[in-house]
Image: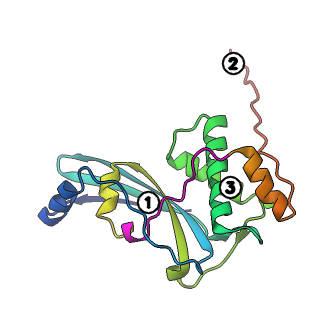
Amino acid sequence: MNYQANLYEMNIKDQIKLLLTFKSKLNDHKIPEENNIYRLHHIRYCKDLMGISHETHCFFEPFKFPKGMTREEGLKVLSYLTDFLEENYNVSECSLKSVNLLEDAINLERFGFERVEIENNKNIVDLFTIEGRIKNFKISEYYSKYFNWYKENVTKEEVKNIYEKIGIEFKDIIINKQKVKTR
């Protein structure tokens, strides 16, 4: 994981851009179909404090979906795992902890994701999770790479079928909820 934090004062041009994005939603941008290397990102924008903005950005190691899995199927799997982890670990939606847990799941061999080395960031599909003042993301350098990768309400049955199609048995992550004895 690479972690960056920035404190900055917005110039008047950025403040105007931000005001113009007040009611608009994030728009999907075209992602080339031939790009098949993915990378998770978590970006958090904090409220301005006395004119100072705060941004944190974490990005993780690139990976490929399991062989035989389409982009659409892979995004469904990631979405299901995200929901499963947030629910079972009682983690806030879109939080850094949620993305960290998803990254840990990608590292589990049984899910079939493949880590890759990259030389050219242009061919990576960036999967952004944005937290905090989302409108700040619209004026960032990353917005042109944004698309909504998260798929709502993916069922375990859908994910099982995706994995069955590629010859892998799917089992949920095992959650070990041991009770801790306290005095």
Compared with 36, 21 (above or below) is: above
Q: Residue 101 carries which label?
A: none
Q: Earlier in the sequence, mark 2 or mark 1?
A: 1
Compared with 88, 173 (above or below) is: below
In the picture of the structure, the residue carrying the numbered disc 3 is: 77
Measure the C-alpha gap from mark 2 to mark 1.
Answer: 36 Å
Q: Which mark is residue 182?
A: 2
Choose between 49 and 127: the one closer to the eye: 127
Q: How crowded is mark 3: few (under 14 residues within 10 Å), some or many (20 or more)?
A: many
Q: Which amino acid does label 3 sit on?
A: Val
Q: Which of marks 3 and 2 is nearer the N terminus?
A: 3
Label 3 close to label 2 by CB (< 8 Å): no
Residue 92: image location, x then y, percent:
52, 39
Compared with 4, 144 (above or below) is: below
Residue 173: image location, x then y, percent:
76, 45
Q: Which quarter of the picture shows residue 136?
A: bottom left
- Magenta stretch secondary structure, dominant: loop
Choose between 53 and 157: the one closer to the eye: 157
Q: Which mark is residue 57?
A: 1
Measure the C-alpha gap from mark 3 to mark 2.
Answer: 37 Å
> As drawn, is 84 to the left or to the right of 176?
left
Task: Please report the residue visible at 66 percent of the width from the left and 70 percent of the height from the top.
Answer: 63
Secondary structure under the numbered disc 3 in the rendered image: helix
Q: Which of marks 1 and 3 is nearer the N terminus?
A: 1
What segment is highlighted magenta in the picture? 143-154
Choose between 143 and 53: the one closer to the eye: 143
Q: Residues within 10 Å of mark 2 (few under 14, many from 20)?
A: few
